[in-house]
Image (spheres, helix red, strand yellow):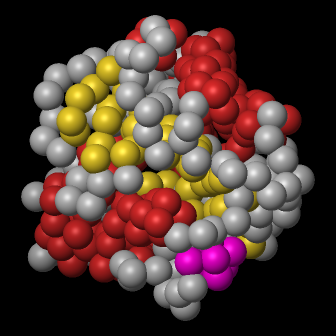
Amino acid sequence: MKILITGVHGFVGGNLVAALKDMHTIYGLDIVTPEKEGVKYTYIWEDLDKDGMVPEVDAIIHLAGKAHDTKNQSKAEVYFQVNTELTKKIFDYFLKSKAKKFVFFSTAKAAADKVEGVLTEDVVPAPVGPYGESKIAAENYILANTDLTKETDKQVYIFRPCMIHGPGNKGNLNLLYSVVRKGIPWPLGAFENRRTFTSVENICFAVNGVLTKDVESGIYNMGDDEALSTNELIEEICKSLGKKAHIWKLPKGLMNRMARIGGWLHLPLNPERLRKLTENYVSSNAKIKKVLGVDKMPVDAREGLKRTLESFR
């Protein structure tokens, strides 16, 4: 297949290129256009407006977006300019093109900011904050301009992944790793939680699956099979470092107050980051596994984390 990937120079984009380049011809679309192994050519967004500039492809994978800023320093309009408007632009291009498949990377946060029980695709979306709201606005635009239940020659997939990680990842997992590596005890042991992570290898497996198989259009949660607690994550980090885990169960009220102070002083531990580290957020991947015809995702949750943590070293 000929595939166009937006945001091709990002973390997920780079992993997708590595996973797909031997089987498919990859073109990129990004705000920067350096040469990249496995990518035949990278275009800029303005090239979409030039007739014949971007070659016809069989599928489009839309990754480009504004990630969630846990420091809350980004203005709301930036999220909508990037996450919503760019999605409209590339989806309009897809509808006019000869491409048959469109994969949009949304986020679990477009469906729910907090999860009671297990998150499934039939939840009524209730995002909180500009990140999730801009992503659901993009989803709604796609849904308003295509009927996922109607038989057409075009197939559309909306992926809602939980936190994606893997070699080359930069984000909260790196921060957590650096804290543990310094020998700093983990003070949030009193928070008992379960949350779903998403190995980038499982992302690549699912994307290749919907591209190469006759999978029905729809919204699909993306995540590993097993949900882990933050305390278990700390233990996995310590194993990768050859250290003994030091987990302190300090009072929750004390840690909440410290996070508020951290927010005022712009310290690494702020209320948003504390919530992300300690909240329950379990997402079901049963639907995507069913359409791909598998009982388990190819990479186990703990094995995927092990690979990510080893890359940090």
Q: Position of residue 95 (x, y in %)?
A: 66, 32
Q: Quadrant of residue 237?
A: bottom left
Q: Position of residue 308 (x, y in %)?
A: 25, 63
Query: Is residue 168 toward the left or the right of residue 217 in the image?
Result: left
**286 in magenta:** yes
**199 in magenta:** no
Residue 253 position (above or below residue 92): below
Residue drawn where x is 17% and y is 55% of the image: 312
Query: Is residue 146 toward the left or the right of residue 215 in the image?
Result: right
Q: Main secondary structure of the magenta part?
A: helix
Q: Position of residue 123 (x, y in %)?
A: 85, 59
Looking at the picture, tell me which residue is in the foreground, 192 or 155: 155
Q: Position of residue 281 (x, y in %)?
A: 65, 63
Residue drawn where x is 26% and y is 73% of the image: 306
Residue 159 position (above or below residue 118): above
Looking at the picture, tell me which residue is in the foreground, 274 or 58: 58
Looking at the picture, tell me which residue is in the foreground, 256 or 127: 127
In the image, the segment drawn in magenta is 285-292
Please identify the quadrant where the C terminus is shown: bottom left
For the question of whether residue 177 can be seen, the reply is: no
| Number of numbered discs overlaid on the protein picture | 0
Query: Is residue 264 toward the left or the right of residue 122 in the image?
Result: left
